[in-house]
Image (cartoon, helix red, strand yellow):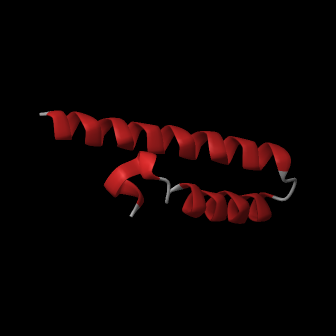
Amino acid sequence: MYRSMKGSAQQVIAAGTAVLLAFFAVRLVPAPAVALGVAVLAGLLIGKLSVFGESGK
C-alpha cells in the first residue's frame, strides 16, 4: 500500500509541475511554438530529479 501511495503522490507532483511549467513558459515566451519547446526541454531536465522516482526515468 505504501508503494502505491508513494507512486500516486509522485505522479500528482509530476503532473502539477508540468502544469506550472507550461503556464510559466507561455507567460514568459511570446511565441507559442517556442514556449512549447522551452516547456518540453525544461520538463525533460526537471523530470530527472529524484523526487519523481521511477516516473522520471
Which residue is situated farthest in the right direction here? 30
Q: Position of residue 21 (x, y in %)?
A: 65, 46
Q: Quadrant of the N terminus?
A: top left
Q: Is residue 25 left or right of residue 31?
A: left
Where in the figure is residue 54, as x and y percent of width and height?
A: 32, 56
The residue at 36%/51% (across/down) is 53
Q: Residue furthest left?
A: 1
51 in relation to 42, above or below: above
Determine whether, in the image, residue 4 is placed left or right of residue 53: left
Left/right placement of residue 39 relative to residue 3 reads: right
Residue displayed at 70% across by 66% down = 37
User: In the image, is residue 50 above or below residue 57?
Assistant: above
**Number of numbered discs on residues:** 0
The quadrant in which the C terminus is found is bottom left
Q: Position of residue 39 (x, y in %)?
A: 67, 57
Vertical position of residue 44 compared to residue 4: above or below: below
Give 18 or 10, whichever is nearer the viewer: 10
Quadrant assignment, res 43: bottom right
Q: Is residue 4 left or right of residue 50?
A: left
Q: At 58% from the left edge and 41% from the top edge, which residue is drawn?
A: 19
Identity of the residue drawn at 84% across and 47% down:
28
